[in-house]
Amino acid sequence: MAKSDMKILLVDDHDIVLRGMRHLIEDILGEECHVDGAMTAAEALSQTSFRTYDLCLLDVELPDAPGITLLRKIRQICPGIKIIVNTIHEELWIIKDYFDAGVEGILFKDVLSSEIATAIRRVADGGTYFCKRAE
């Protein structure tokens, strides 16, 4: 897929994170990619119901829905979407749930921006990316 055609949904309940991630992604992929943001599960589901996204960078700690539930609902609405989970939770049982849900990537929130860039590129090109502590 040409990166200029990529539609990305960022989901995080912190405005500063959304703004920073949007800036980072637009810097990495160029301004021709389309990046939307959602601060709640309800907003994310609304966005995916009217636009098809290629990739979702998903914070799974949202105030209005459990992350695994939201992930599954997004997949139902937008079956072709690739999902990279962005989380602070490193517990093995939580990571296993995301592997079992078939996510294409897992990033912990303390990774460097270069690792986020690598993950997005790899997943956008059809691969997977799991930061070292999630493997």
Image (cartoon, grey):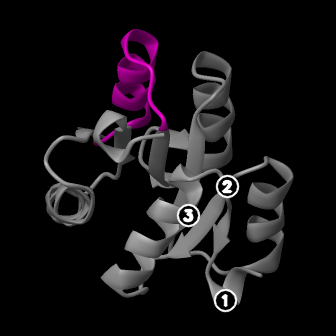
Mark 1, other Cα within 10 Å: few <14 / some 14–19 / many ≥20: few
Q: Gap between marks 3 and 2, in whole Å?
A: 9 Å
Q: Is residue 82 left or right of residue 10?
A: right
Q: Which residues are magenta?
A: 39-54
**Residue 116, percent across and down?**
41, 73
Q: Residue at x 44, y 81 (%)?
A: 115
Disc assigned to residue 104: 2
Query: Decide: marks 2, 1 in contact (CB < 8 A)?
Result: no
Look at mark 1 in the image and give the residue it sits on.
132
Mark 2, other Cα within 10 Å: few <14 / some 14–19 / many ≥20: many
Quarter of the image for residue 36 reads top left
Q: Tell me the amino acid under the disc marked 3.
A: Arg
Q: Nearer the viewer, mark 3 or mark 2?
A: 3
Magenta span main SS: helix
Q: Assess whether residue 41 is covered by the magenta stretch.
A: yes
**21 is higher (above) or lower (below) than 107:** above
Look at mark 3 in the image and give the residue it sits on.
122
Disc assigned to residue 88: none
